[in-house]
Image: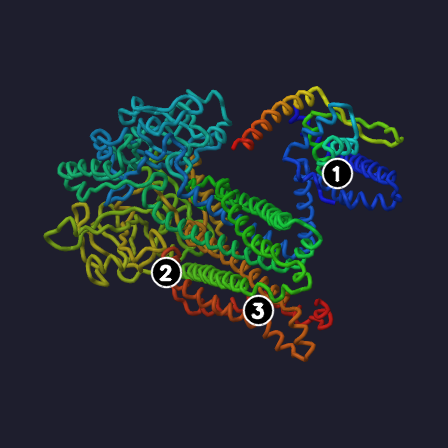
Amino acid sequence: MSLLRNLASGIRALFRKEQVDRELDEELRAYQEMAAEEKMRDGMSRKEALRAVRLEQGSLELTKQVVRSGGWESLVEACWQDLRFGLRTLRKSPGFTAVAVLTLALGIGANTAVFSVVNALVLRPLPVERPSELAFLENARYGPSQSFPNYKDLRDRNRTFTGLVGYRIAPMELETKRGAERIWGYLATGNYFNVLGIKPALGRFFDQNDDVHPGASPYAVLSYGAWQSRFGGDPFIVGKTIRLNRLPYTVLGVAPPDFHGTELFYWPEVWVPMMMQPRIESSNWLDDHGSSNTFVLGRLKPNVSPAEAEADLNALAAEMIRQFPDQNDGLHFKLAKPGLIGNMIGGPAKAFALGVLTLASLVLLAACTNLASMFTARATDRQRELAVRLAIGAGRSRVVRQVLTETLVLSLVGGAAGYLLASFISSALSRMRAPMDFPVQFNITVDWRVFLFALAGSIVAAGLAGFAPAWRASRTDPNAAVRGASATLGHSRLAFRDVLVVIQVALCFVLVSASFLSLRGLQHALQMNLGFQPQHVSTAAVELNLAGYSEERGRVFQRQALEAIQQLPGVQSAAYSNSVPLSIDQSHTDVFPDKTDLQPSDRITVVYYQVSPGFFETIGTPLLAGRDFTWRDDAKSPRVAIVNLAFAKRIFRADSPIGKTFPGWGNPVEVVGVVGDGKYETLTESQQPVLFWPILQSYNSTTTIEVKSSLPSTQMVSEVRQAITKLDPDLPLYSVGSLEQMLDSAFLPTRTAAIALSAFGVLAIMLAATGINGLVAYAVSRRTHEIGIRMAIGARPTEVLLLVLGKTAALLAFGSLVGLTLALAAGQVIASIVYETQPHDPLIMVSVWIGVALLGLLASWAPARRALRVDPMVALRYE
Amino acid sequence: MPDKSSDLVQGTLDMLVLKTLALESMHGYGISVRIEQMSKGVFRPNAGSLFLAIQRLHRDGLIDGEWKTSENQRRAKYYALTEKGRKRLNNETREWGRQAAAIARILEAS
C-alpha cells in the first residue's frame, strides 16, 4: 500500500515535474515568508528579515534540491540527465563517436560471427539425446570407415556401448514428377534412431526389426526439409510409396526439423535401412570383410570412459585380426568426436577453427586496446571540463558516473551495430552453398553468450580506460585544472598509452602479414601445376547402376553417349571416366611392387581412375612415354594400364617402365604409358602414385563425361544434356558444369582461409589506423600550448612536425619490430593451413613494414596538420 | 547560529513531526515553530530536513496534505495525521519510551 503510494508519488514527480516543482516551490516560499514575517514582528525590516531567513535556512534552491533528492525518482532523473548529456557530448565529437562505434561494431561483430562459425563447425554437439555420450569409431588403417562384418562383430560383442550404429552417406535417385532426381541420403542400421534417441516429427522410424534381411526392408524416413520441399508437408505422407532407384519404398515417418543426420555439415534428405544397401548401391558389400564402407557411431554406457571403450574395442580387434588376418591386418580402433567423420574432416576443421579463433581473439584484443587508448585520451582531454564541473559543485560520484554513462551508451550503440554485423555475416554464411554436388550446409546462428562476452569485454575495456582518468580528474584540485595546469599532469599515463599503441601496431603487423601470406599462398595455389588443364573442359556425370542399367547395357550406353557428344559442333575432344582428379569421388586400390616374396607391408595404396581412350588429351594431361588406351584395349585383349610418373618411380624405380608388369587381380598387367604427375585428392597432398585402367577392361557404372571445347561451358553443357536426354530421357545428370567450377570445392578451404585472413587483416588495419590517429591527435592536443610557444619564438614547421611525430615514429618502429617477430612465428602456423605459403616471404615482410609505416603517416596526417595550424596567440591565451 | 537540528537523533524528526500533527493539522513553518517551542528551543529543524521528513511521511501514507489559506491570508499546505500515522505515532512513542528508559537505566547504573 505505502509502496504503491511511494511509487505513484515518484512517478508523478517524474512525469508532472513542473507541477510538483511549483507546489514545492510555493510551499517553501510560504515557509520563508512566514519565517520572515515573524522576524519582522521582532522589528526587522522586510529585507533584513528575508536575508536572515536565508542565512539561517540556506538558499531556497538548495533546500529544494535536498528535498527533491529524497525520492527514488531523483536517481532516475539524474541517470536520464547523464544519458542526455552523454549523447550530446558524443554528438559534439562525431569523429570520436564514429571511430569508437566502428571499433566496437567490428570487434564485437567479427568475433561473434567467427565464434558462431566455429561453434557450428566444431563445438556444437549433435542435436540428439545426451550427445556427450556419443563417439565416432576410427581405425588406424582405413580411417573413418569400417567393413560391415566388422561393424556387426563390434556391435554384438562389445561390452562398453549401449549401442553401436552403422551408417553410410549415399546418393539415391528419387522419382519425381519432373523425372528422376539425384538426392543424398543415409543408409543406416535399424538401431540408428533408437541409439541416437530421436523422436519422429511424424509417423515412426525404422528399428532393428525392420533391418534384418538384405533387400527386404523397403522403408524410408524423410528429413523434415525434404518432407516440406519435395512433398509440400503432406500430412498423410506416412504409408505412401516413393520410388528410389526405380524401386518402391514405404515412407515410415519424418525426422524432426533440427535433425540433419550425424554429420554437422551434411544435410541428407532420406534415411533407408542398411539392409537395402545392395539395392541402393551398385555392389553388395554387406558380407565383405575387405570393403570398409561403414561409418560407426556408438553411445557409451554411463560411467564408461572413452579410454575404457577403446581398450574394449581393441581387445575385440585382436580377435578379429586372428579370424581374418588378411583383411583386418593392423586393425586398431580409436574414438573421435562425432559430427565430422572423425579426424578426416574433424582434424583440419579443428586446426582451421583454432587458427581463426586465435586471430579473432587478437582482433578483439586490438579493438579493446583501441577503445582503451581512445577513452584514456578523451578522458584526459576532458580533465579541464570535469574540473570545471567539480568547481561549480558537481559531486565527485556524479562526475565519474557521467563518464561511465557515456562509455555505456557508446558500448551499447557499438554492440547493437556489432550484433547486426554478426547476424548479417552468419546468415550469409548459412545461406552459402558450397559449389559442389553434395548437400554441404552449416547451421550458423549468432551465439548469444559469445555476443554478450564480446560486448562485456569491450564495455570493461572502455569503462576501465575511461574511469581511471575520470577518477583522477575528480581528485585533482579543480582550481589548478581549470587554469590549464593539467598540461603538466599525467605524463606517467602517457607510458601506458604508448604500450597500448605498440601492442596495436604489433597486432596489426601480425594480422596484415598473415593475410598477405595467405593471399599469396592462394595465388600460388591457383597457378600451380594440377597435372591437367581445367580450362575449356566441361563435365557431366550419370550413374547408370542407380538408373537400372546392367553392365552390358551400360557399356553400350557409354559408347553411344560418347559418340553422340563427339559429333556435337565445337567439340575438340571428349572422353569418359569413373571420376576426374580433385573431385570428391576418388577411389583407391592396393598395388604391390614388382618383386618376389611379398610382405603385407609392401602394399602401396594408389589412387585409380577408369578412363576411356582420349581422356588424357581431353583434360590436358601430358603423355610422357608410351601410348594412350585405344578402343581395342577391351576384355578380350591382354590387361594394360597407364601410370603416372610417381607410380613409375615408386613401384618400378624407373622413369619409363613401359612394357613392365605388375600383379593385378591374378593377371600380370602391362604398363603401356606414363603420364605427368598432378594433384588428385587435395591441393595439399604430396605426390601420389596413380594408376589408370582402360574402362573397357574394368567397367564402372559411374560415368563422368569430359568435353573439351572452345564454346562457353554453359552452352556446351546444355548440348551435352540434350544429347544424353535423347538417349535416355529419365537419366539424371549431376556434377554438371565446367571443370574449373568443379575445382572450386578443392579450392574451398584455401579460399575460405584466405578470405577470413584478409577480413582480419582489413580489421587490423582499421583498428591500427584509428589507434595511431588517436595517439597523434592526443599528443597534439596535449601540447597545443607548448607548440604555440615554440612557434611564437620562431620554430619552423619541420621542427613542430618532428616534435609531434617523433614519438609516434619511434613507437611505430618498435611495434613493427615486435610484430615482425610475432609474424615470423605465426607464418609457420599459417603455412600449415594455407597451401603454398612461404612463412618467411621477405617481399611480404618488407611490404607490410612499409605499409604499416605509410599507415602511420596517413593516420597522423590530420592531427599533424592541426599542429602546424596552431595559432600561437590562441594557444597562449589558453593559459 | 548553530544548526540545532543536527543534534536530533537520526529518525526522530519523523516522530516529532507526527507528534506535532497529532495535536492539530499544520503547515510546514508551523511544524517547525511548534517543535522549537515544545523543545524549548533545543531543536530547530532546518527547512531541508523538515520538508524531506514531510515528503517521506506523506509518501508512506502517514500524513495527508491539503492547500488552505492561513490566518494571515497566505496559501499554505496543511498537513494532517492519517489513521495509519496515528497508529505509527502510538507505536513509536511506546517504543521510544521503552528505549529511553532502558538507556537511562544503563547510564544510571554505576
Mark 1 against mark 3, which lies toward the viewer?
1
Eye-nearest disc, 2 or 1: 1
Q: Which chain is indicated by disc 3?
A: A
Q: Is residue A130 visible?
A: yes
Residue at image position (64%, 59%) is A477
Of badges 3 and 2, nearer the viewer stands 3
Residue that badge 2 annotates:
A828
Marked residue chain, label 2: A
How is colour applied across the structure in the image? Answer: rainbow
**Residue at horizontal 32 percent and vertical 24 percent from the top:** A207
Q: Are marks 1 and 3 on the same chain?
A: no
Identify which residue, A711 or A752, lies in the foreground: A752
The CA span between labels 2 and 1 is 76 Å
Is residue A733 visible in the rendered structure shown here?
no
In this image, A99 relative to A393: left or right? Answer: left
Residue matched to label 1: B47
Instruction: Report the residue marked by disc 3.
Output: A857
Residue A658: percent from the left, percent from the top?
22, 60
Earlier-in-chain disc, 3 versus 2: 2
